[in-house]
Amino acid sequence: MQQEIVNRISNFTLNMGLNESTLSTLRQEFPEIHFTYCSDDDILDAAPAQEFDSFNLYLVDGSDHCLKFTSNFETATGVVIAEVFED
């Protein structure tokens, strides 16, 4: 996955807001990428590829038949969009 694609994903999410409609559109626009939506509090021991006030983007590598977080754009096969809630 190229960083440009991740930038397009984050820009679209910033413009449209994080909701199921946004995720549905992203899945249609990028069918080769697996998208997951969760709360940022659910993610432990992983650094986001991109951070924003309302969400963080994490990259996922599924190339070894086992999913794992990665910071490598080239090996990423999926994106987790994790919603950030104010305390």
Image (cartoon, grey):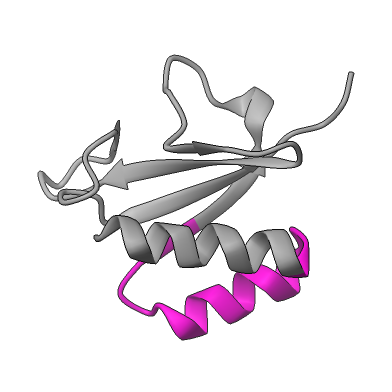
Residue at the image position 50 percent from the left and 76 percent from the top: 27
Instruction: Classify 21 as above or below 57.
Output: below
Give the image quarter of residue 24: bottom right
- Figure quadrant of the N terminus: bottom left
Tell whether position 28 is magenta. yes
Q: Is residue 39 left or right of residue 60?
A: right
Q: Is residue 52 left or right of residue 53?
A: left
The span picked out in magenta is 16-35
Residue at the image position 20 percent from the left and 40 percent from the top: 66
Residue at the image position 65 percent from the left and 62 percent from the top: 13
Instruction: Classify 81 as above or below 56.
Output: below
Where is residue 58 shown, x and y percent of the image? 45, 40
Residue at the image position 87 percent from the left and 26 percent from the top: 86
Instruction: Classify 82 as above or below 35.
Output: above
Q: Is residue 86 left or right of residue 44?
A: right
Where is residue 65 shown, x and y percent of the image? 15, 47
Q: Is residue 30 left or right of residue 80?
A: left
